[in-house]
């Protein structure tokens, strides 16, 4: 508790405020470019060559597993046509649903040009195809089926499907219209990944139907030769892709490019609210609510992350800080757009209830919110276990998030939350402030104080301390000597020099940390400096970090990756949203409005 840290001097001379202001883009320009990039991140990563070619007949719920239908129009070009099914029915010529008797037909083609090993399955189509039996065609492909034994109560139209010996369907089911031989329609389901559930040749009618689906977001894709994605139903869910991973980067093959993190979604929403980008804010709010768990023990909790295309199928992993910030974002949206408040109120109430339940009622962390929950592997579960493991540590960052969330709830929901915010602030000052370090601790572990020194406890800690009236502590926390070890300078690929702050520095708490500029944290320092009235230092901080803005308007997560600590160099929603908030001087820890 009483240990001290060596003070590292700044790595380069600090420019005058006049020079800093000269380097700083006009606020309006910076906000325009950052929010435009955030909007772009709402779009799916993989986009078809053509828009509006294919659609679902209706919106299918995530839990739905029944038949799915849709329609498409042709993209530009000429496409060869062939029979839609290898089966021909010769008699009766008009096969009605109530027919009971002999049916004669022929298999005219199979996948390999023969009928060897194939069987003809016959049955009825109501909600889906129900096979009632099968016969093997002769060497010439002819077959006969006696349907007289089928009960008259069995409903639906007659249908016939050729199947290979391994059970795979061969061609379309009779009756099928002709098909475009180089086009197919895929039914996909998006959960933790995007899975192809079934594939059908594209019929010339433009109407397509699948007998069954699977849980997840349903999507139809019109696919051309060699797997070219020609058209697809929209995968836009309001969830934002947290990182933009460049093509060719090894991370492109991982889940990262399509992953949405609740923290990033929340910060982007508050940036949109603060920048008065209403349509962007509404879309982000919609996506944020899809990250919220709606039933079970964790009803009301926001998942830590999920795939952009199916945010309501994320892993049941919860972090109290990300949840509190997400709840805060919902409340900020309600405050900014009161006409939408009633629709968001149930989600806000359940989220607040889950957050309140995280407050420890006893022990050395009493009064603080605890870390959250991790999923437990099936092998480690016991009968009756809910599949999650509670995290007993308390993070200072999490508690700052929860404090401001409670404080905003007192304004948006009801005044009783003010007392909860005050009680949490009291516990934080008693248990997390370290006089020997002149800052807040990183948190409290079960084993005792966590004295590691991340940037967050300085930037976010100062905002909290100022809000509760501890102005001297806030200024001390953001002092030059306190921030000096984090300070780093780097040169961008275009030769521009950038200065900013790292997530942490090489120290007992973060051994081997690679020096880097962390734009999210740097902009949060600027935000905090504005909060405590150090506007010139804030402007200088933004100006020195601003040359790191990429041509598309975004900012990277860090200037130099560090896999040990999960730091990546990709353009990041968190950094870009925080640039917006820092430029505006408010919008996240001040109930959603800029100063």
Image (cartoon, rainbow, N blue to C red):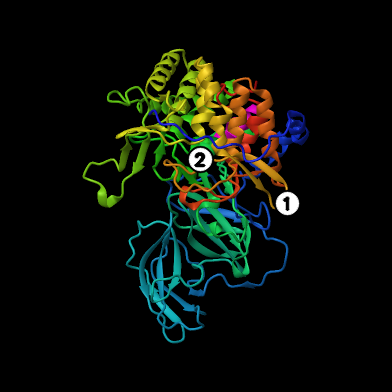
Q: Residues within 10 Å of mark 1 (few under 14, many from 20)?
A: few
The one nearer the camera, 316 or 320, is: 320
**Residue placed at 77% from the left, 29% from the top?**
18
The majority secondary structure of the magenta stretch comes to: helix
Residue 221 in the image: above or below residue 589: below
> What residue is shown with label 2?
504
Let me know if residue 61 appears in the view.
no
Q: In percent of the image, x 50 and y 26: which residue is there? A: 461
Determine the CA span between mark 2 and mark 1. Answer: 26 Å
User: Which label number is shown at residue 494?
Assistant: 1
Residues 586 and 442: in front is 442
Region in magenta: 267-277
Q: Residue 46: x and y, percent?
A: 60, 55
**Does residue 40 appear in this view?**
yes
Q: Quadrant of residue 478?
A: top right
Q: Quadrant of the N terminus?
A: top left
């Amino acid at each position: 508790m009483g240990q001290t840290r060596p003070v590292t001097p700044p790595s380069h001379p600090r420019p005058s405020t006049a020079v800093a202001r000269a380097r700083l883009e006009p606020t309006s320009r910076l906000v325009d470019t950052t929010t435009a990039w955030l909007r772009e991140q709402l779009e799916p990563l993989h986009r078809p060559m053509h828009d509006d070619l294919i659609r679902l007949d209706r919106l299918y719920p995530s839990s739905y597993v029944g038949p799915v239908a849709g329609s498409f129009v042709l993209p530009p070009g000429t496409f060869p046509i062939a029979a839609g099914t290898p089966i021909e029915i010769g008699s009766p010529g008009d096969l009605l649903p109530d027919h009971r008797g002999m049916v004669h037909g022929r298999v005219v083609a199979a996948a390999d040009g023969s009928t060897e090993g194939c069987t003809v399955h016959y049955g009825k189509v109501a909600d889906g195809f129900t096979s009632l039996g099968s016969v093997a065609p002769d060497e010439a492909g002819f077959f006969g089926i006696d349907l007289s034994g089928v009960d008259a109560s069995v409903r639906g139209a007659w249908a016939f499907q050729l199947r290979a010996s391994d059970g795979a369907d061969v061609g379309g089911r009779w009756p099928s219209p002709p098909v475009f031989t180089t086009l197919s329609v895929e039914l996909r389901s998006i959960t933790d990944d995007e899975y192809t559930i079934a594939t059908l040749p594209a019929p010339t009618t433009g109407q397509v139907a699948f007998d069954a689906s699977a849980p997840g977001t349903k999507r139809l894709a019109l696919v051309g030769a060699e797997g070219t994605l020609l058209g697809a139903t929209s995968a836009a869910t309001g969830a934002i892709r947290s990182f933009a991973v460049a093509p060719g980067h090894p991370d492109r093959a991982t889940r990262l490019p399509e992953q949405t993190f609740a923290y990033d979604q929340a910060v982007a929403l508050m940036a949109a609210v603060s920048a008065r980008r209403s349509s962007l804010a509404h879309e982000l709010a919609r996506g944020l609510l899809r990250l919220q768990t709606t039933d079970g023990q964790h009803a009301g909790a926001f998942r830590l992350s999920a795939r952009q295309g199916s945010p309501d199928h994320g892993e049941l992993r919860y972090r109290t800080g990300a949840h509190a910030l997400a709840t805060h974002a919902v409340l900020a949206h309600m405050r900014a757009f009161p006409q939408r408040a009633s629709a968001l109120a149930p989600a806000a109430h359940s989220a607040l209830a889950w957050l309140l339940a995280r407050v420890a009622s006893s022990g050395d962390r009493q009064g603080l919110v605890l870390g959250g929950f991790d999923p437990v592997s099936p092998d480690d579960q016991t009968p009756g276990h809910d599949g999650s493991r509670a995290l007993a540590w308390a993070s200072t960052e999490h508690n700052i998030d929860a404090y401001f969330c409670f404080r905003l709830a007192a304004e948006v929901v009801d005044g009783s939350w003010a007392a909860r915010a005050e009680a949490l602030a009291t516990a934080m000052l008693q248990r997390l402030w370290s006089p020997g370090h002149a800052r807040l601790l990183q948190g409290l572990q079960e084993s005792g104080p966590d004295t590691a020194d991340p940037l967050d406890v300085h930037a976010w800690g100062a905002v909290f301390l100022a809000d509760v009236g501890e102005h001297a502590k806030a200024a001390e926390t953001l002092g030059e000597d306190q921030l000096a070890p984090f300070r780093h300078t780097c040169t961008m690929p275009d030769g521009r020099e950038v200065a900013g702050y790292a997530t942490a520095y090489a120290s007992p708490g973060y051994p081997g940390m690679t020096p880097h500029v962390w734009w999210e944290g740097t902009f949060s320092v600027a935000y905090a400096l504005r909060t405590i009235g150090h506007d010139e230092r804030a402007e200088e901080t933004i100006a020195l970090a601003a040359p790191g803005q990429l041509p598309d308007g975004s900012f990277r997560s860090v200037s130099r990756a560090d896999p040990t600590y999960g730091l990546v160099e990709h353009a990041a929603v968190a950094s870009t949203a925080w640039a917006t908030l820092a430029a505006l001087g408010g919008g996240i820890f001040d109930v959603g409005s800029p100063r």
